[in-house]
Image (cartoon, rainbow, N blue to C red):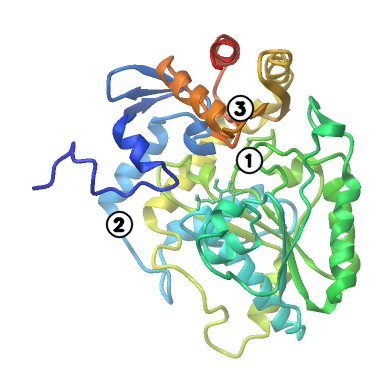
Amino acid sequence: MAERNDLSAFWMPFTDNRGFKAHPRMFVSAKGMHYTSATGHQVLDATGGLWCVNAGHGREKIVEAIRASAGELDFAPTFQLAHPLAFEAASKLSMIMPEGLDRIFFANSGSEAVDSALKIALAYQRARGQGSRTRLIGRERGYHGVGFGGISVGGIVNNRRQFGTLLNGVDHMRHTHDLGRNAFSRGLPEHGAELADDLERIVALHGADTIAAVIVEPVAGSTGVLVPPVGYLQRLRDICDRHDILLIFDEVITAFGRVGKATAAERFGVTPDIITMAKGLTNAAVPMGAVAVRREVHDTVVDNAPAGIELFHGYTYSAHPLASTAAIATLDLYREEGLFERAIELEDYWADAIHSLKGAPHVIDCRNIGLIGGIELEPRPGAPTKRAMEIFHRAFDEGLLIRVTGDIIALSPPLILDKSHIDEIVGKLAKLLPAIG
Ligand code: PMP
């Protein structure tokens, strides 16, 4: 018989299932900045769920819109048919994208958005008569979801090694993380723009006419808050332009105000050809991913196709009515509350708070941008990641949700937080750091 407290059937993703099931920690509800745990404790959400609840939990406007929409239109296909909400969501989203990236493809997650973007890049090269451009370039320590495309261009060994040979024809540039030169940088680190020249080396090795696209996260989140060095993204853009290579920004975590603008592209003043998004698009209330495509890329694929279907790609749930509704309500809410600007308003206070942990036990780096914070701990000798996991568990028990990746604490609170929440987050960490061995 199915039991609510039978923990055996659910194979949890990215989880130490045996560890969790011995000591389960669960949430049963959420409102604003807080979760309520199954044991009735309030837990301050310093991670926006998983970098996704940008407007805070349980927002009435979004919940109500979803409720009404579910009763009106549960589902409609978007293959050869459609529903108006899909167009409205795409149009609204296109309006906050950088100039020119106004064609929107919908998926259901960040991983699907990434694989869609890679396929669109390949279809584009073929459509313009450059079918030899099939190579895809990612970066060490890149996280681009868990599809085969995403783990192939991604650079995280744990996410790759269980799964065979992955995609052919993928190369990786180096990442930009450099504690030797950049430890305790506030905002953009000073050193490392020249690492973009790795792309020139890859071009020299294979020939530009074999390379379709380069994908990077403007700020890498899942691999521990890697903020781009000053000038790095522009240099990458210049090299892509020189060799006619598409540049894809994976903005699954950085879009929707996380760095103080609608996109990191806008914040850093560098416009890619394609942007992938998910998470904050619906405030995570309904799964949705999206790809914003430069109009010329879209038109090349569409105009060069023979009559009929132009792109043989899509999901049953592309632009699902509930997700479209949630996106429309969420984008309205962001605008009404000025939430994209919030990260800029709070950035200095946030940066001061994060950097106040410099000198705390085990801390070897603090970094920040927008409302993102990274605190890197020295790994426990012989037991990497254990120190961070210990602080994760202790923080939870103290009523604070953080995220850890490797030995790095990654923070990305809902953008509705105020200074007292920042004080609480950092105050709790300052108390916990000396308490772990
Ligand atoms: N790309 C980036 C940059 C991400 O941070 C994530 C998720 N953390 C993904 C893709 C994958 O998104 P999802 O888990 O929704 O598939």
Q: Looking at the image, is mark 2 or mark 3 earlier in the sequence?
A: 2
Q: Position of residue 398 (x, y in %)?
A: 43, 14
> Does residue 235 appear anywhere in the picture?
yes
Q: Position of residue 384 (x, y in %)?
A: 59, 34
- Front residue (pair 387, 51): 387
Q: Does dot 2 land on a helix, a strand or a loop?
A: loop
Q: Residue at x 42, y 51 (%)?
A: 323
Judge from the rendering whether residue 84 lies leftward or rightward of residue 428; answer left or right.
left
Q: Position of residue 71 (x, y in %)?
A: 25, 50
Q: Which residue is mark 3?
A: 380
Amino acid marked by disc 3? Arg
409 shown above or below 319: above
From the viewer's perspective, is the residue at label 2 or at label 1 nearer? 1
Q: Which residue is mark 2?
A: 73
Q: Position of residue 200 (x, y in %)?
A: 89, 63
Q: Is mark 1 within 8 Å of ligand 1?
A: yes
Q: Residue at x 81, y 38 (%)?
A: 178
Q: Which residue is mark 1?
A: 221
Label 1 environment density (alpha carbons within 10 Å; few <14, some 14–19, many ≥20): many
From the viewer's perspective, is the residue at label 3 or at label 1 nearer? 3
Q: Quadrant of residue 116?
A: bottom right
Q: Quadrant of residue 399?
A: top left
Q: Decide: marks 2, 1 in contact (CB < 8 A)?
A: no
* Distance from Cα at disc 2 to Cα at disc 3: 53 Å
From the viewer's perspective, is the residue at label 2 or at label 3 nearer? 3
